[in-house]
Image (cartoon, rainbow, N blue to C red):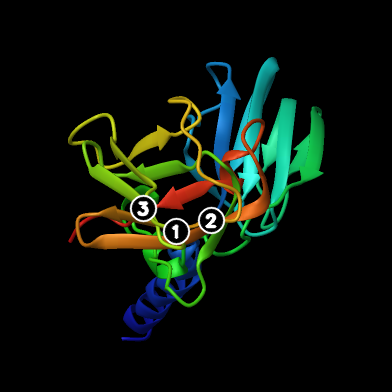
Amino acid sequence: MRMAAASALATAGIMICGAPALAQAPVALVEDVRGNTVGVEFMDYVSAGKVIKLRPQDSIVLGYLTSCWHETITGGIVTVGSEQSDVQGGKVARRKVKCDGGRVALTAGQANQSAGTSFRSLDRESPLTLYGLSPVVEATGGAALLIVRTDRHGEYHVAKLPKPGAQRSFLDFAVTAKTLVEGGTYRASIGSRQIIFKIDPSAKARGVPIISRLLRFQPAS
């Protein structure tokens, strides 16, 4: 009986200790990757504690969703942190960028679902701010997107996300040379799902990190 009880307690202890790891939310977005051995891909989300090994010629760009640190790392061993990376044996160029820190980050509960594909909607009272004129929209592949300006009539944009049927697809307005207007307020809709957001008055058209202009739709239920 004592041995059985001890075994049960040990098993419970393992489950309790393992729970936080399962609930850990992604903290950074892979905005660029060069090399074949890094183990991550473009637009992957990574959690704190993730170790990425880079060969001397490999590089990766990480955008931290909450702290808004933007890192370009070349070579070495990278350990993803909660706010920035620890880099051993490599080079890192780190800069603080404008992003709506925390508004685009996943909650712990959402992180338990498949590979970071569930996102929270943004409420009307506190719209997300984008710091680039060309949003990057993340949603399911093939989704029909409508963006309408709400503070002034006459401006709207219609597009369809690539890769029909894919759980995660991305549409970068910069690639299609489409821009929104500085200081404007917009509603992005996919079916009944919508995100209210505004463009920062000092937003730029080029050279803006993805974390500064990211719109993320939760999958349709």
In three-dimensional space, the C-alpha distance between marks 3 and 1, rounded to whole angstroms, equals 9 Å
Circle 2 is placed at which residue position? 184
Between disc 2 and disc 3, whose residue precedes?
3
Circle 1 is placed at which residue position? 152
**Residue 200 is drawn in which quadrant?**
bottom right
Residue under the image location 37 percent in, 50 percent down: 154
In three-dimensional space, the C-alpha distance between marks 1 and 2, rounded to whole angstroms, equals 8 Å
Camera-nearest residue between 127 and 201: 201
Specify whether 194 is left or right of 149. left
Residue 206 horizontal/vertical position (percent): 64, 31
Q: Which of the image's four quarters has the N terminus? A: bottom left
Specify whether 55 is left or right of 211. right
Specify whether 195 is left or right of 193. right
**Residue 157 is drawn in which quadrant?**
top left
Task: Evaluate if marks 2 and 3 touch, with contact meaning CB atoms under 8 Å apart.
Answer: no
Circle 3 is placed at which residue position? 148
Specify whether 50 is left or right of 156. right
Q: Secondary structure at mark 2?
A: loop
Task: Evaluate if marks 1 and 2 touch, with contact meaning CB atoms under 8 Å apart.
Answer: yes
The amino acid at mark 3 is Val
Would you place residue 114 above or below residue 123 in this image?
above
The amino acid at mark 2 is Gly
Camera-nearest residue between 170 and 10: 170
Residue 113 horizontal/vertical position (percent): 32, 58
Task: Evaluate if marks 3 and 1 touch, with contact meaning CB atoms under 8 Å apart.
Answer: no
